[in-house]
Amino acid sequence: MKHLLSPLDLSVDELNDLLDLARDISINPKKYSHVCDGKKLATLFYEPSTRTRLSFEAAMINLGGSVLGFSSADSSSASKGESVSDTIRVISCYADICAMRHPKEGAPMVAASKSGIPVINAGDGGHQHPTQTLTDLMTIRELRGSLDNFTIGLCGDLKFGRTVHSLINSLIRYKNIKFILISPKELRVPDYIIDVLRENNVEYSEVEKLEDVMSQLDILYMTRVQRERFFNEDDYLRMKNFYILDKSKMNLAKKDMFVLHPLPRVNEISVEVDDDPRAAYFKQVQYGVYVRMALILTLLGLDKEIQ
Ligand code: NCD
């Protein structure tokens, strides 16, 4: 049985197949509308989320399946002291596949080791967020036509932003990608991510000012400052307005640069940027549903059944 705990659980070939399937779904959604008839997805969300949980639910419903689950630890048996291992054993009797979000790094991995059904990591603490990465990869591929040969600027909270960690881990497998890591000193990417870049001889630089590098970027990946992972509120308040992408900064960028953001946005992209044709973050949300549909089909082994 296959789980998705890290974006690296899929080989580059498997990932390309999955993105091809996601594209086919986007072109022919009707063809897929009954593939999961009778199947159930459990969404086990121990940490708040709107878009990821609803995106999974929409994905399963679009495939003809149904969904069950909980949206906070308070409304689950975790509040009575049940372990993740026990919960997943129970859920394995109710559902065919599950998506789990948990504030503790590694919790979905623990669940997978006891699970009778495929487990998808829907975000574990500040660690990984593989389905956001699939979404980001599909978005980049659809917008640029390929996942090779570009410069990406990742901007904001690179320390706690799990979407950034997963995306870097994935993108290093493609050709000729340059990373510009844009953050305040306090929110730099963790050392283990720098090690990954170094070990793979990937070109990267770390800078503090977005304006200085704007003109070099093909993709700008903005992130919010992850308030819930800060140890004290004063640090958050000092950091929260560090980057605000507005029209004047967009004027410095290439005409064919695209702006991505995993959302939710707080204030790091001014709403005046939303009408810019290079703003791709709402398109990205739609791609997120297609890749999750493709992922559910793949993990359930139903991807080969569709003609
Ligand atoms: C991200 C997350 O949960 O890490 N959101 C999401 O899933 N789209 C990004 C964030 O919360 O900032």
Image (tube, rainbow, N blue to C red):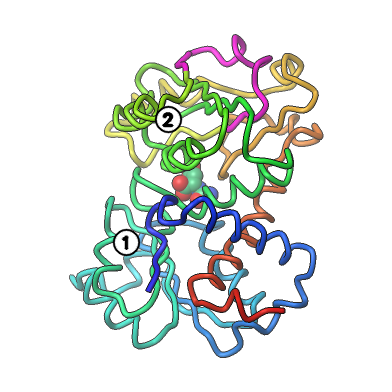
What mark, if any, has residue 169 been given in the picture?
Answer: none
User: Label 2, on which residue?
Assistant: 158
Q: Quadrant of the C terminus?
A: bottom right
At a point 41% along the width and 20% down the height, the residue shown is: 238
Counting residues from the start of the chain, the first of labels 1 and 2 encountered is 1
Distance from disc 1 to disc 2, alpha carbons, whole Å, reads 22 Å
Residue 89, percent across and down? Answer: 27, 80
Q: Which quarter of the figure has residue 126? A: top left
What mark, if any, has residue 108 been given in the picture?
Answer: 1
Residue 278, percent across and down? Answer: 76, 33
Is residue 216 a member of the stretch shown in magenta?
A: yes
At a point 48% along the width and 42% down the height, the residue shown is: 170
Residue 79 visible: no
Callout 1 amino acid: Pro
Callout 2 amino acid: Leu
Whether 301 is drawn above or below 113: the answer is: below
Between 184 and 192, the residue placed more toward the observer is 192
* Label 2: how many Cα within 10 Å (few below 14, some 14–19, many 20+): many
Secondary structure found at label 2: loop
Which region shows up in magenta? 205-221
Confirm if mark 2 falls within 8 A of ligand 1.
no
